[in-house]
Image (cartoon, rainbow, N blue to C red):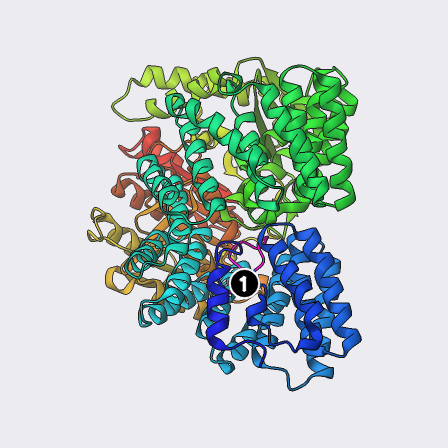
Amino acid sequence: MIFSIKQLRWLYISLSILSLCLAVTIIPTRASLPVPTTSTLNLSASTSQPTNWLEQGRNLYHSGRFAEAVTIWQTAAQQYHIQGDRLNEALSLSYLSLTQQELNQWQAAQQSIEQSLKLLQTSIPSADAILWAQALNTQANLQLHTGKAETALESWQQAQKFYEQAGDTMGSLGSQINQAQALQTLGFYRRSKQQLEALTQKLQGMPDDEIKVSGLRSLGLTLQIIGDSKSQQILEQSLVIAQKITAKPHLSSILISLGQTAVDLQDPEAALNYFEQAQLLTTNPSDQLQARLAQFKLFLNYDKLEFVNPLAPQLLQQLRELPPSHTSLYAAINFVATLNHQSNSEQILPLKDLAQLMAVTVKSAQQIQDTQAEAHALTQWGKLYQRTQQLSQAQELTQKSLNIARQLQANDIIAQSAWQVGQLYKQQGDRSKAITAYTEAVNALKALRGDLVAINPDVQFSFRTSVEPVYRELVDLLLENQPSQGELIEARELIEALQIAELDNFFREACLDRTQQIDRVDPTATVIYPIILPDRLTVILSKAGQPLRSYVTHKSQAEIEQTLDNFLVALNPVSDSKNRDRLSQQIYGWLIRPESAEQAFIDTKTLVFVLDGRLRNIPIAALFDGKQYLIEKYAVALSPGLQLMATRSLHQNHISAIVGGISQSRAGFSALPAVESEVKQISKAVSSRVLLNQEFTSQALAKRVKSSSAGIVHLATHGQFSSRLEDTFLLTWDGQVNVKELSELLKNRGSDPSKAIELLVLSACDTAAGDDRAVLGLAGLAVKSGARSTIATLWPVKDRAAAMLMSRFYDQLRQPKITKAEALRQAQISLIRQTDFHEPFFWSGFVLIGNWI
């Protein structure tokens, strides 16, 4: 046996800082396997030279000098091969693959792990279980990286068996945490959650030792990445045990993780406290630097310049003195990138000092052959020259970065450097070259899709600062002056792609794959794209069989957004109705009136809006032309873009529904007494299976969805939509079901599209207060649930009005040849004209998202 169990456990623990933890792949770009030390290798005297190579490889790996570690381990593998030592050859190849994955050398990593596994299978069939476990773990990590989550899951299941065979508890637990990550990637959120909960129970039953500390930290980080709020609780438990057993090497890394959680929860005081503790307690220079950098970023984000100014030169000096390594290079890049995002950073440090740091970083990256770090450093260096208007130098450096990125086929770097090249061309007035560069950046972002979350965390993409602006700036360029038909088509496609990218970012994975162009679904529909640009609002109209049209309103983005916000406030029934109508007419004029004057909407029955930015928060149906609401003239639907699931219309003669709801006060939420009436009315209108109050549990709903062929799922319960995944949920009797779990539950009939839910209705939900992008959660659920259409509320509507509207909606839906959008329109009109609920507040919050037929 090459490793003893005791030695392996020590080895795992000693590596927890570099690879996040144990045998666990938490962030896919981080390798997950231990690197051997000489103390754990059972080598004879005759193999002393390879021992030195393996030790060198270990030291280089630990210091982040991955390219050099690759060279050493290649040599070790060759020498073991010559000596006929198949066990250590297989081991060397496994670690070689691990290191190649760190460098994104996927093809080489694949070859290395295949050779390692072939040796284990053919040359040394009696190889120790721990070797098999390590090799399979390396293979699974690679498989997850390269989009093969299903095979990764199988490999980790096999690895778990070998770890258990070897008696390695931590290896087994690590493999199970990895399996939960793979299940998440495959969309099996409830299975993943069940596995993680079971692992939590296993860990609770273990003795308080370093293995338990590391296991809990691994679990906490996994939960953090998938958006589970329990992550903080698990990390805190890990910290308490680490303090209790004085596990000093773990304390700082756990505290940094807790600090990042507090940042995510927008609790800067708690975050700062964790980062300060990490800095004081760390025994590792790398963790000390990371803690100080985290504090620096926090101070900058909250404009605490009195703390930023003294810390910045200290960090600069520390970064200058560090020896070249993967870790030190990215620390420097991250530091400069953080300052490059600040418009006033020259007041913090002279830009020439930052440029000098990037020059040294580029040189150091070349020295240790870290080509990706070199490309990132060149991009940030170029940005510094761009800020000082030294455009030729900026162009030269950024182009070098782009050339390296193309050679590496690194889309994450291409996206950033090509965007910067585009900005430079735009500044120089070369629109054509700017569009070409921006297009390359957008294509790189599209290629990344769900992998945006998996990019090196030291240069992590921020959607708001590094993704969304690329799309918007290209759209702005395309729609300058009098755009051609081709430019209008491209701008429209970009806005759709941006909406999908935003949903991907919300779910932290690619979420929309099966699509159909909606302008080919219904020739009586006109699709409207209002696009908010810095100095204007451009509207593109799309109608089947006709060229695209566009018109422009010249107003600043700030003025447009303020008007939209004021309108939303004015919808409150106690507000001044004249002010509401004035604002409503103004927005109507921006979106509808210019084209109505030209009779562009002749033969149009449905207006489909692909809304942009703050426009998504307002009820389009309530726009007013001075005489009528928009809903009185047209059916209205919302869409994330031309890309939707393939559709079919409901068979009105065979409508059946699953109806669930909560009328009683539950879990701190107020009672909804009219829900009982709503449920009864729906049951009379359509054939229904009802789950009310105690019966409405997540398990019961899942069971009913799976066993029933009902085309409608109607849920009358509290829920919230938010731009944060963690804060988007639906209330069931047994607790909150988050949006990922709900979407999996609703797709519980398998992959057969003919069994998909036709219509999902959420009649008592709300958008998160103070969240100007909260409707993203609604759009996300509408897309991710697999339902062809979704009806939901933008705000809590008086429950008697909601019950009345929904009852009339179902009455209309039973009529022959009526679309879902028209049924909703008729229900809304009935409230306007036949009830006391004629104010827009009571009926316009109901929106239809997805296919309207």
Q: Residue at the spot x=53%, y=60% of the render?
A: 25
**Disc 1 residue type?**
Ala
Which residue is tagged 1?
182
Quadrant of res 170: bottom left
**Residue 813: horizontal and vertical position, in percent?**
45, 50
Q: Which residues are magenta?
A: 23-31
Left or right: residue 570 compared with residue 458? left
Residue 657 visible in the snapshot: yes
Residue 26 lies in the magenta-colored region: yes
- The secondary structure making up most of the magenta span is loop
**Residue 373: horizontal and vertical position, in percent?**
66, 41
**Residue 98: horizontal and vertical position, in percent?**
64, 61
Of 511 and 414, which appears nearest the observer?
Answer: 414
**Residue 540: horizontal and vertical position, in percent?**
63, 26
Left or right: residue 52 compared with residue 37? right
Of 131 and 157, which appears nearest the observer?
Answer: 131
Q: Residue at the spot x=30%, y=48% of the render?
A: 718
